[in-house]
Amino acid sequence: MATEALNSQNLHETTFQKLRSLLVEGKIAPGSKLNERELAESLNVSRTPIREAIRRLAADGLVELIANRGAIALQLSIEDVIHTFDVIADLEGFSGELAAQNISEAALSELEALQYEMMASYARRDLSSYYKLNLRIHHLINQAANNPVLSRLFTQVNARIEALRFRSNQDGVKWEKGVEEHQEMLDALKARDSKRMRKIMMLHVMNKRDVVVQLLQSEAALEANQS
């Protein structure tokens, strides 16, 4: 019985992570309805873990549950995106500042290892792997700040724009700039320079915001021309 429960738990977690990746990587487009039957067939599971995954994704802010429509992949307006990035910039700036003051040597070593792996993914132009490592780095910095309230806020707000952060790396020049900024973060943490770390983190997020807004504006203009 214990083994069955563990297997069921693993299945539900795996289904959640797969569905989350589909949303973050844009394989389920913003505004699209999540069809339980189709998802169950494509992921080769029953509808029960799909339903649980959708509930968790709704709690994380990646899915909206709308009366008479069901589960819809989150779609933000450009104004929503700007407001969300503005909040994230302050949260990440504060997180970086605290991390520079509080990070342990063990966490710093883990960050260096993740940075090395992320650079290898960048060299292969493996965007999916790069983004997952990138996200782990941001979460580790956030954890190193040693402020649980800040961590919860960051996770909650960041979920709204994860898919957009992923897509923003598809521009080669902008992607390279993001990689450089990550090295600057690591250098600031090693130096325990909290003011510099706050500045780098905020600049990193605001640069990301500008790339995302430009992308969304280009898509809106293209759609307008086609209609």
Image: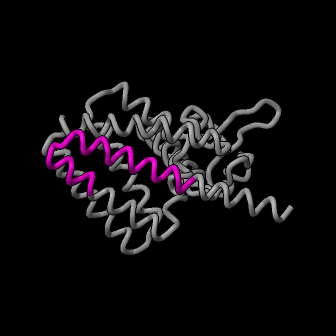
Query: Residue 117 appears at what percent x and percent y?
Result: 30, 63
**Horizontal side, residue 38 vs residue 53: left or right:** right
In the image, residue 181 lies at what x, y percent? 33, 57
x then y, percent, for residue 35: 74, 47
| Residue located at (56% from left, 37% from top) | 83
**65 vs 119: above or below:** above
Residues in magenta, as a range: 184-212
Q: Can residue 18 be seen from the camera position used here?
A: no
Q: Nearer the viewer, residue 107 or 194?
A: 194
Give the tally of numbered discs.
Answer: 0
Q: Quadrant of residue 226?
A: bottom right
Q: Find out whether residue 31 is within the magenta segment.
A: no
Q: Is residue 198 magenta?
A: yes
Q: Quadrant of residue 49?
A: top right
- Residue nearest the viewer, comparing 168 with 129: 168
Quarter placement of the N terminus: top left
In this view of the protein, which residue sits in the foreground, 149 or 38? Answer: 149
> Which residue is at 48% across, 53% downward?
208
Furthest residue toward bottom: 124
Question: Which residue is farthest top?
Answer: 149
Q: Is residue 32 visible?
A: yes
Q: Is residue 224 left or right of residue 173?
A: right
Foreground residue among 32 and 210: 210
Q: Main secondary structure of the magenta part?
A: helix
On the rendered image, what quadrant is the C terminus found in? bottom right
Name above or below for residue 205 compared with residue 5: below
Q: Residue at x 57, y 42 (%)?
A: 82
Q: Position of residue 195 (x, y in %)?
A: 24, 40
